[in-house]
Amino acid sequence: LDPELREAIDECVRVDLASLDPAPRAEALRRVVGALRAQKAQLLDLVLYLEPALNNSSNPQGRRQAIQFLADCLKDPSADLRLNFKHVETFANFFSNKLSDWQCVEGCVTGLQALLSQSAPQLRTLKADDGGSMVAHIARTLFKAVHAPSHTQQVRKCVLDLVRCLLEQWGPEVAALGEALGEGVLSVTEEERDPRNLLLAFAISK
């Protein structure tokens, strides 16, 4: 990675910018997305560069910012990432494995939603280690690893959006969960009380 791109990445994941003026981060993200579009870097290159932050157990906010940054790059259609089957498999496993990190849930859910929405042809053919579909694995991991009521309204909405996407667009795949599917849906909807999320929770529970 060239020095200017590294500087832009560092700007995107700086913890002290997380709650301040979003403009510098947005501009830095635009520069990174531009580099991805121009194929000056690959998304996997960014993961490798961010590995120290992603694995730093003493800096939870740093992990959160790094995961959110990767998800923001993935969901930006202007990045024109052109992910192949191996890329999609790698990122599906990456975000699924990170769901158990409480600080990273929002970014992981955002990243998984981007994959489900933008890389459906690749995902439909991928298998998890247990031989089942990759999408069923994502749903199972989400329900097992994420305790939605413990998160903020914004994060809970992201989780609800992902569950709705799974139910509406990936019904045959998630049906393989059997009773665990109903239990998982109940776990993310039954304690929801925020009016901003209730309509979504009701739609999912139908």
Image (spheres, rainbow, N blue to C red):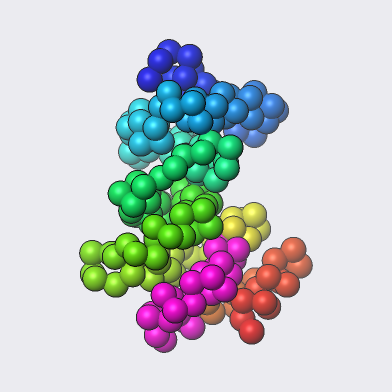
Vertical placement of residue 42 versus 151, above or below: above
Vertical placement of residue 140 versus 38, above or below: below
**154 or 161, which is in the foreground?**
161
Tell me if 31 is positioned left or right of 121 in this view: right
Asked whether residue 195 is drawn in magenta, I would say no
Asked whether residue 163 is drawn in magenta, I would say yes
What is the quadrant of residue 140 in the picture? bottom left
Q: Tell me which residue sits at (35%, 31%) in the image.
A: 45
In this orientation, does residue 15 appear? no
**100 or 28, which is in the foreground?**
28
Q: Tell me which residue sits at (61%, 81%) in the image.
A: 205
Q: Tell me which residue sits at (44%, 79%) in the image.
A: 172
Tell me if 133 is positioned left or right of 71 in this view: left
Picture coordinates of residue 119, whole percent (x, y): 46, 54
State the quadrant of the C terminus: bottom right
Vertical placement of residue 24 versus 72, above or below: above
Picture coordinates of residue 173, whole percent (x, y): 41, 75
**2 or 56, which is in the foreground?**
2
Which residue is the extreme one toward the right?
195
Q: Which residues are magenta?
A: 159-184
Report the number of numbered marks: 0
**Which secondary structure class fits the magenta region best?**
helix
In this orientation, does residue 182 appear? yes
**5 or 61, which is in the foreground?**
5
Picture coordinates of residue 103, whole percent (x, y): 47, 48
Tell me if 35 is positioned left or right of 47 in this view: right
Q: Tell me which residue sits at (52%, 21%) in the image.
A: 8
State the quadrant of the N terminus: top left
Picture coordinates of residue 57, whole percent (x, y): 35, 40
